[in-house]
Amino acid sequence: MTLLELKKICKERGLRLSGDKDDVVIRLMEDDEGEEESQVSAGSSSNNTVLIKIDGPDRYMITIGTFIIFYSIFRGGIGLMFLLEAHEILTALLALVIAAAFMAGGVLTVLNYRNGLIITLGALVLSGLLSLLFSGGFNPLSIVWLDTIGHVISMMCSGVCMVFVGVPLLTSINTLKPGWPGESETSSSLGSSNISSKEKKITVACPYCDKNLRVPSDYSGKVRCTHCDELMEV
């Protein structure tokens, strides 16, 4: 079949049309294998699986990651303020290390990696403990300087931040990307490409037409059902 004919089949199935002929053939083969797996798991010959178009990145993760990045810049600025003071060099350096951890966690979170939230959560725990130890005075490790209620405010701030970071880590475990950037790049080997694509697909039900939609397991965001053409959140 010609490339144009193959792309027409991709369009009918709701698959991406980009790539050369080899890419399109592999995409159709993976789709055929996925349909066979759905038929076996359903225990019948009928299959109502409908493929989807992926519509943009996860805006919630981008929002959280952006706040983490801005917070890392703020904490790094506080550390730099005290870096020139002789009695605060060690605490300033530790503050810069924590800021760097927040920066790494924020960037990975924007990219939808699970490790970004894990790094951020660890940095929050360490930062919260140090903030409790050094509260009561303005210093690189604690921005709460009230003597009487400093510990309470520090605990509340750390707790709220941990909730915001921990909730998506628990609720989006199937949609966050595992590992690190660069590890999940598509292999030049066709066999490896087939295996990785098959392992990363899950089935969700469209709330508008009750059709089963097959989506990549590491995707989170909006998708469009090709059966009823409605947008939904995954």
Image (spheres, helix red, strand yellow):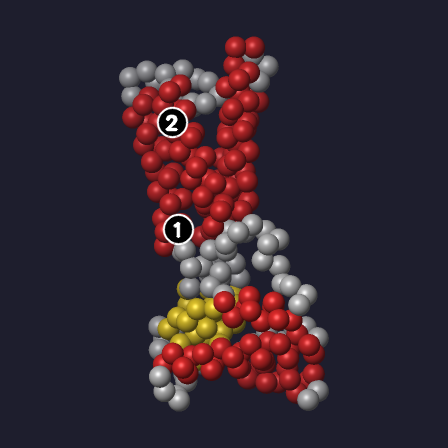
Reading the image, the residue beneath label 2 is 129
Return the disc, 2 or 1, that comes first in the chain's sequence: 2
The mark lying in front, picked from 2 and 1, is 2
User: The C terminus lies in which quarter of the figure?
Assistant: bottom left
Disc 1: which residue? 168
Can see residue 230?
Answer: no
Quadrant of image for the N terminus: bottom right
Q: Is residue 228 above or below residue 147?
A: below
Q: Residue at x 35, y 27 (%)?
A: 154
Which label number is shown at residue 92?
A: none
Going 51% across and 42% down the picture, which residue do you hit?
Answer: 105
Percent coordinates x, y for residue 134 in the rendering: 40, 19
At 41% from the left edge and 55% from the top edge, which residue is drawn?
173
Say if 203 sits above or below 172 in the image: below
Say if 48 sits above or below 79 in the image: below
Disc 2 residue type? Leu
Residue 8 % position (x, y)? 62, 85
What is the residue that sits farthest to the top in this orientation?
87
Horizontal arrangement in the rendering, residue 167 relative to residue 185 (left or right):
left
Q: Crowdedness of circle 1 by 10 Å Cα count: few (<14), some, many (20+)?
A: some
> Mark 2 Cα within 10 Å, few/some/many (few <14, many 20+)?
some
Q: Quadrant of residue 190?
A: bottom right
Q: Secondary structure at mark 2?
A: helix
Foreground pick, 65 / 126: 126
Q: State how far apart marks 2 and 1 are (Cα).
A: 23 Å
Rendered location of residue 149, percent (x, y): 29, 21
The answer to whether residue 183 of the structure is visible from this angle is yes
